Each structure stands twice: as structure tokens, then as C-alpha cells.
Amino acid sequence: MSPLWLKRKSYAFEQYTIDVILGRREDTGAAVYGAFLQGLSFLFNGLIQLRFWLYRERILHDQPLGCLVVVVGNLTVGGTGKTPVVEKFARALAERGRKVAILSRGYKSKRPPFWRRAWNALTHSEEPPPRVVSDGAQVLLDSEQAGDEPFMLARNLPGVVVLVDKNRVKAGTYAIRRFGCDTLVLDDGFQYLPLKGRLNLLLVDTTNPFGNGYLLPRGILREPVKHLRRASYVFLTKSSGRRDPELEELIQKYNPGVDIIECAHRPRHLQRVGQEERQPLDFLKNRRVGAFSGIATPESFEHFLRELGANLIYTKRFLDHYRFTQEDLDLVFDQARRAGLEFLVTTEKDAVRLNGDLRFPLPLYYLRLEIEIIRGAADFQEAVSRICFPEEGQPLPVPR
């Protein structure tokens, strides 16, 4: 069995599992596999409840670091549009004079080799410091070393420190001592209990709030829906502008009176990959275009392109965080040429995984998105003000 064969089988099995979870398959095999996953979900739920109980009863302890900690996260796996919200919040804090560090675990980033980690454990060597993606002045790591989202944040947020480490307590301590940070933003930190947030920003994707209602691995929930009560503010992301009374009623049921901030991802422009060229959005209108992506919710990306007037002839979807090879791109561009496409479009998160050695036979652009708050802007500004100038406002909401 060759490594390539194993990789393809692994990819196919992962895709099959995703299809079962999302209800895309309804055959007998999918039903049996779904029942097996549901049993694992009950076990997972028990472990989750035990973990929260241990922290609630102070058998396990969180570690205060002596500065403000803001948590941004969600109850589900997959794309809730978290990175643009982290970017907007960190930028707002930095513009008001806070020294901000974003702490990320660097999902699917390149870790130190196993032998080095094993040697450190065996010899009780001092743990290496967090990986510094940005020191606030310059970006120091690429997307493979840092992870997609930390690299994007570092590139888009000059003046903000970005650190990657699975141990966010260690990373936060380093940010305070090395860079003098007074505000820590935990990217995807809602389930990270060793470092308690003073402010918990919970994101809920309006297009698929809680999946099928099951916890992992049968569904997409990391913890039960009732844990909405732990949020200080709830951000409804990917909103179409139409209110969802049923969803808001559910949120208020578990967290009465919580402020709900509704936001949408708005396309801003097209950026040529690897070049300075930038095109306005109407560049897409009536053009024969193809799209490829390796993100959790490719449907929303493709919907944007169609809404902007693109004649979307060809699409290719990869798994979330997929790292493209030259062979993958050769296939995509060959199919694009055969279809007579004028150019291809990908996402910004995918673009950071395209290194400079890859060849693009057709023009390739990425779609730059930014967050726009369409309801609750006053609540957002109030949250920022309470962090930056706590003596002038009311106390921050206390997460439960």
C-alpha cells in the first residue's frame, strides 16, 4: 500500500463521514455508521459534562494572568466566520490604545517533530516558547508554520501580536512578559477552560446554527446547546438581514437578556494571488469563472460569487484546511481551461496555503471578506468601550 493510496482512502473516508453527519447520504451503510457515531456522541457528552464539573467544583483550576482575557469561539466545529470577527474586535481594541495579543492553537499548523517533543518530555527540558507569528511589527512565520487563521490575522493586523501554542496559558504569560500586552484575545477559545475569559463572545452561524443537534462525532456540536448561557455576547454570523425569531428565542431561553449582535460577511474586492493587482467586485459580472476552496462551508463562498454576478461554471471542493499540492492545482486548472474559464477564484484562507512555488496557468484571485455589523452595533461599541475604559462604563457581563 503506497502512501498516496492511503492518503486517498483517508480523504475519502473523512469525506464520507462528513456526508453522514450532514445528512447527505441516506443508504443503509450511512444509517448504521450514523448509529455508531451517535453512540460515541453520548460518550463524548459524558466527558464534556465531567470536564465542566471538575472546573466548576474547583477540582481543576483556571489560571488568572492578571490582565483582561477576551474569548471568541463557538459551540460547533466548522466555519462560523470566526476569523473576521476576531480581526474586527482586535483592531477595534488596538485602535483604542490596548496592547493586544491574539492567542491561537494554530489548527493544522506544523508542530515541532515528535522526537523533539518526546526528548523534552523525557529530559524534563524547559518547554519551547510559543511560536511568534507576528511581534506586532512584522509577520515572522508562514501559514504552514503558523496555521491559516493566525497567519491571516497577523497579515491583516499590524500592531497586534499573534502567538500560536496549544497551551494558551503559556502563550498568554509570554505575551505579557515579552511584549507588554494588556489584553489577550483567545481565538477559538470557548472550550479552553484553563484560561477563563472575562468576556465571552459566542458566534452562531445563522445558516446552520447547531447542525443536527448532536454532539461530536454524530453532529457538529462541541458542547450542548444549553451552554449558550456561558456567553457574554452572542454574535449571529452570516446573516442575510432577515431576523430568525425562533433562533433568537432559543438563545434567550438559555441566556435571558444576553445582547445579540447580528453581522454579515461582506465581500470587499478581489486580490490577485501573489501579486499587487486588485479588482473591484463588478469585475466578476457576467464573467466565466471557476472556484475552488478547502473550507468548512464552501456553499457560502460560492453563493457570494453568484450573487456578485459571476457565471460560475466550475467548482471544486476540498476538505477544510486542505493543503494543496501541485498535482491538485494542475487538475483544477486543466479542468478550468477545458471549460473555457477566464479566471479562478478562491478564498483568502485558501490563498494563504498557496506557496510561491506553485504555478497558476490562469489568473487566480481570492475574495476578500470583512465583517459588517447590521444589528447591535451599539452593543459592539459598548463591549469595546467597557474593555478599553472600564471605569467609564458598567461592569462587564460575567460569563457563567
Image (tube, rainbow, N blue to C red):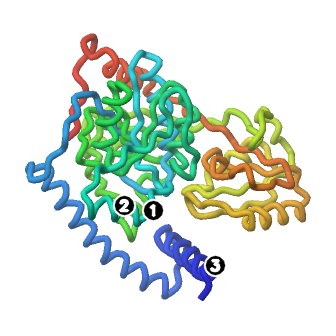
Q: Seen from this angle, which residue lies furthest top? A: 392
Q: Position of residue 338 (x, y in %)?
A: 90, 65
Residue 121 occupies quadrant: bottom left
Amino acid residing under circle 3: Leu
The answer to whether the residues at label 3 and label 1 have Cβ atoms under 8 Å apart is no
Mark 1, Cα crowd under 10 Å, few <14 / some 14-19 / many 20+, is few
Q: Dividing the image into 4 quarters, which one contains the N terminus?
A: bottom right
Which secondary structure, mark 1? loop
Q: Earlier in the sequence, mark 3 or mark 2?
A: 3
Label 2: which residue?
A: 117
Label 3: which residue?
A: 4
Mark 3, Cα crowd under 10 Å, few <14 / some 14-19 / many 20+, is few
Amino acid residing under circle 2: Arg
Location of residue 47 with respect to 243 vertically, above or below: below
Residue shown at the point (34%, 41%) measured from the top left = 171
Which secondary structure, mark 3? helix
The answer to whether the residues at label 2 and label 1 have Cβ atoms under 8 Å apart is yes
- Disc number for residue 113: 1
Q: Dividing the image into 4 quarters, which one contains the C terminus?
A: top left
Residue shown at the point (53%, 26%) measured from the top left = 137
Left or right of 267? Residue 97 is left
- Disc number for residue 263: none
Residue 136 seen from this side: yes
Q: Position of residue 71 (x, y in %)?
A: 34, 38
